[in-house]
Image (cartoon, rainbow, N blue to C red):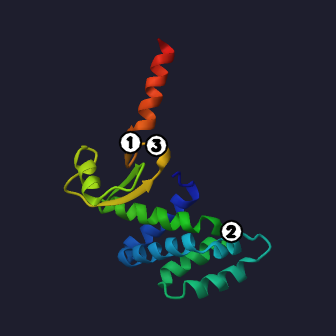
Amino acid sequence: MLTSKVAKRYAQGLLDFTNESGQTAAVFSEMKDVVKIMSQSVDLNKFFLTPYIDAKKKIEVADQIFKSLSVSSLNLIRLVIKHGRENQLKNIAQEFINKVEDINGVQRITLTTATQLSKENIDQILRSTNLVKADSNFDLNVNVKPDILGGYILRVGDQQIDASVKTKLSQIKKDFHLN
């Protein structure tokens, strides 16, 4: 997923601040909560995207929803709303999480399969490639997409292995058209 420049800049500013103040671990956990809340609440997203509600009212609502967060996290949320960037709040929080995970050496892995796989099969796929570092932590996201027909698509960072049946069939079809 592409992240906007706005989200990257706010996340980097928050990371710089939390590193200086020693709050990175606490804010990291809180940003996970922000992403979870923003992902689950359609009504909150609609409220934040409503242009005719003024920033003061949005800040009041955000203060109530996120009242358990630290002052640093609340100040970021208020700042984002004050600058009219509340539509980027979830992206900012996710980008902050990504930056902290990058610093800690956590690999982000996405595995797309045609059907649900067992843990043993997933582990075997991850061990079969040199993209996944065996000695590092990773954040695994497993997606099931029946339209790939079979096999898997493994994405680690910005690298991808496409071993899906759909891609192989497309390649065979392309080869037939060329000959």
Report the front residue among 45 and 20.
Answer: 45
Reply above or below: 178 against 160: above
Q: Earlier in the sequence, mark 2 or mark 1?
A: 2
Between disc 2 and disc 1, the foreground one is 1
Residue at the (39%, 58%) spot, across then down: 141
Which residue is denoted by mark 1 in the rendering?
160
Q: Is residue 117 visible?
A: yes
Q: Quadrant of residue 53?
A: bottom right
Residue 39 placed where, x, y %? 55, 69
Reply above or below: 72 against 102: below
| Residue type (three-letter) at the residue carrying disc 3 | Ile
| Residue type (three-letter) at the residue carrying disc 2 | Gly
Estimate the spatial distance between the alpha carbons at disc 2 and disc 1, rounded to whole Å.
Answer: 36 Å
The tag on residue 107 is none
Between disc 2 and disc 3, the foreground one is 3
Between disc 1 and disc 3, the foreground one is 3
Q: Residues within 10 Å of mark 2 (few under 14, many from 20)?
A: some
Which residue is denoted by mark 3 in the rendering?
148
| Residue type (three-letter) at the residue carrying disc 1 | Gln
Residue at the (30%, 63%) spot, across then down: 104
Q: Earlier in the sequence, mark 2 or mark 3?
A: 2
Q: Is residue 12 visible?
A: no
